[in-house]
Amino acid sequence: MTWLLIFPFAFHRTPIIGDVTPDAVNWADVIVWGGCNLMPSTLQTFAGLDVPIQVTISTAFDDSNMSMQYTRDGGAWLPVISNESINLASVVNGTTLNFRFTGYSTIGKKIIVTITNATDGNTQLDTLTATQGNCL
């Protein structure tokens, strides 16, 4: 029964070899000026990786009258809803990520966006806050 000798190795997982911790990313906080326009965050580019990683975007909205979108690598802007977690697979050096916000909410209401590295034990990479301002 030679298959018994092979069986223990059939499900062996190869460990990730290489750096899975990107260089620091820092999205600046944003003031959302009512429904006047879409307020973008600062574009961030991932670097310092040896292997692809998975990045997770998690959100929490104070008010459903605020909205948020994200774009990866300059592609289409995609909507994000409150309490949603979005998994971005295969983030590599040069991958870009940006957010934009709008709102018709009470001044001071917030959207909190947390960006984590799922490949590295859900290590938090950054937190971004978009705060409702007054449209003058």
Image: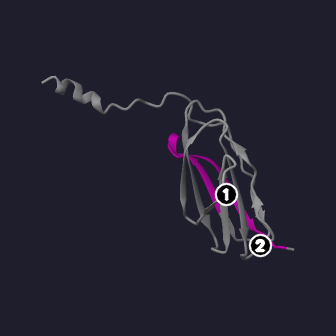
Give the label on residue 35, or none.
2
Q: Please identify the quarter of the rendering in which residue 95 is found.
A: top right
Seen in the picture, residue 81 relative to 88 is either above or below; the reply is: below
The extreme front residue here reads 76
Q: Residues within 10 Å of mark 2 (few under 14, many from 20)?
A: some
| Crowding near the residue tagged with mark 1, few <14, some 14–19, many ≥20 C-alpha atoms within 10 Å | some
Residue 44 position by quadrant: top right
The amino acid at mark 2 is: Gly
Q: What segment carries the magenta color?
A: 112-135
Residue at disc 2, secondary structure = loop
**Residue at the image position 70 percent from the left and 49 percent from the top:** 74
Asked if residue 121 lies in the magenta stretch, the reply is yes
Q: Which numbered disc covers residue 77?
A: 1
Position above or below: 109 against 1:
below
> Where's residue 130, x and y in %?
71, 62
Q: Pointer 2 and pointer 1: residues touching (CB < 8 Å)?
A: no
Quadrant including the N terminus: top left
Q: Earlier in the sequence, mark 2 or mark 1?
A: 2
In the drawing, does residue 42 fall left or right of residue 127? Answer: right
Secondary structure at numbered mark 1: loop
Q: How is the image coloured?
A: one colour
